[in-house]
Image (spheres, rainbow, N blue to C red):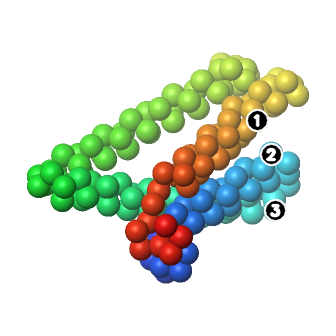
Amino acid sequence: MAVPIFPILAKKMTRRYVYIDSIGIQIVGYILLIVGGRSPLVVTVATILFYLPYQLVFLSTLTTITDAVEYGQLKNGVCNEAVTLSIRLLLDKIAGALSNGLVGFIAMVSGMSGGATASDLTSKVVTTFNMFAFVVPEILMLLAALIFASKFKNKLSKEN
């Protein structure tokens, strides 16, 4: 649903702010999941706040990478789009594999593997799960937004 509005937002507020604001909205979604994780309404709102801006983050990143590759091709005089496109697919596969591995790791560290049942979920298990599944990703998302904000320069923007 967010993909069609990306060009409009990118024109009005630049890709830099689309990315940063989208990360901020996702972090709010994470916080809502941690705080109100037992309420179906809060979980629904939090899920929407987390997943809706994901496409905007992805498109901001993808267009920035594409611009960097095209700039490199302009400077070097060599066009390697096939290599660029195949590397992106490879990165998608690696990200999928890593995310599955992280889910397994989080389940094992939290004690939610094997024959664990709902009655085995102590407050320590829930706290450990929340730390690895919510707090650490929030910190990494915030770090990504800070790096993007400090390194990304939009030549069309009035701010740079």
Mark in front: 3 vs 2: 2
Compared to residue 64, the image places residue 141 above or below, namely above
Q: Marks 2 and 1, Cα distance to the nearest angstrom?
A: 7 Å
Q: Secondary structure at mark 2?
A: helix
Residue drawn at x 47%, y 56% is 152
Which residue is at the far front?
160
| Residue pointed to by mark 2 | 34
Compared to residue 143, the image places residue 121 above or below, namely above
Mark in front: 1 vs 3: 1
Q: Position of residue 145 (x, y in %)?
A: 59, 51
Q: Is residue 151 left or right of residue 118?
A: left
Q: Amino acid at mark 1?
A: Asn
Give the class, few, some or many, for how many residues have Cα within 10 Å of label 2's Cα (few <14, many ≥20).
Answer: some
| Residue pointed to by mark 1 | 130
Q: Secondary structure at mark 3?
A: helix
Q: Position of residue 120 (x, y in %)?
A: 82, 23
Q: Position of residue 12 (x, y in %)?
A: 53, 80
| Residue pointed to by mark 3 | 41
